[in-house]
Image (spheres, rainbow, N blue to C red):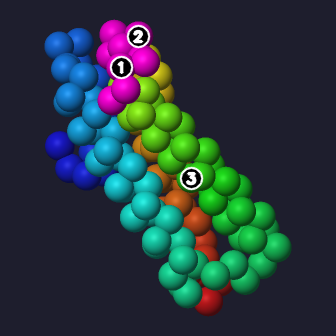
């Protein structure tokens, strides 16, 4: 599986440690996306691009916070892996959708240079 490959499902036999590792990697990928958006190439040149960038930034922040909440809860054993499987799957699906939005935005921003 590549870094941007399909990670939308958590296998039934996944351990809590495996899920934690995947969530932590996901968090690193979110930080990487955030870094890409800080590039001068991604500076919005139109109001539409500015609005889109702000929306993406907000989504990134929300997803990072949600990721960290799950990681913390799993580490502190206040959330059990079996109870968190669906939420973890949603996190991975949300990441994939957000990654696509970021890539689309970058492409659009480059067109307006």
Q: Residue 17 placed where, x, y %?
A: 20, 28
Label annotation for residue 64: none
Q: Disc 2 or 1, which lies upstream in sequence?
A: 1
Q: Is residue 24 magenta?
A: no
Q: Is residue 82 magenta?
A: yes
Tell me: residue 82, above or below residue 69.
above
For image coordinates 67% across by 54% down, the residue present is: 58
**Closer mark to the observer between disc 1 and disc 3:** 1
**Closer mark to the observer between disc 2 and disc 1:** 1
Disc 2 element: helix
Q: Residue 90 placed where, x, y %?
A: 47, 27
Question: Camera-side residue: 22 or 46?
Answer: 22
Tell me: residue 68, above or below residue 111.
above
Q: Can the viewer see residue 82 in this picture?
A: yes
| Quadrant where the C terminus is found in the figure | bottom right
The residue that label 3 is drawn on is 60
For image coordinates 50% across by 65% down, the residue present is: 34
Label annotation for residue 83: 2
Q: Can the viewer see residue 91 in this picture?
A: no
**Magenta-colored span:** 75-83
How many numbered tags mark residues here? 3
Q: Residue 6 placed where, x, y %?
A: 30, 38
Check the image and name the residue furthest to the right. 47
The quarter of the displayed image where residue 80 is located: top left
Marks 2 and 3 sit apart, C-alpha to C-alpha, by 24 Å
The residue that label 1 is drawn on is 77
């Amino acid at each position: 599986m590549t870094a941007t490959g399909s990670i939308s499902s958590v296998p039934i036999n996944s351990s809590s440690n495996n899920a934690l590792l995947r969530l932590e990697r996901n968090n690193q990928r979110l930080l990487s996306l955030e870094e890409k958006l800080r590039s001068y190439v991604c500076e919005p040149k139109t109001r539409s691009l500015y609005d889109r960038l702000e929306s993406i930034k907000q989504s990134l922040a929300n997803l990072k916070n949600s990721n960290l909440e799950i990681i913390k809860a799993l580490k502190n054993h206040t959330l059990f892996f079996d109870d968190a499987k669906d939420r973890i799957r949603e996190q991975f699906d949300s990441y994939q959708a957000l990654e696509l939005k970021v890539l689309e935005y970058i492409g659009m921003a480059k067109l307006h240079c």
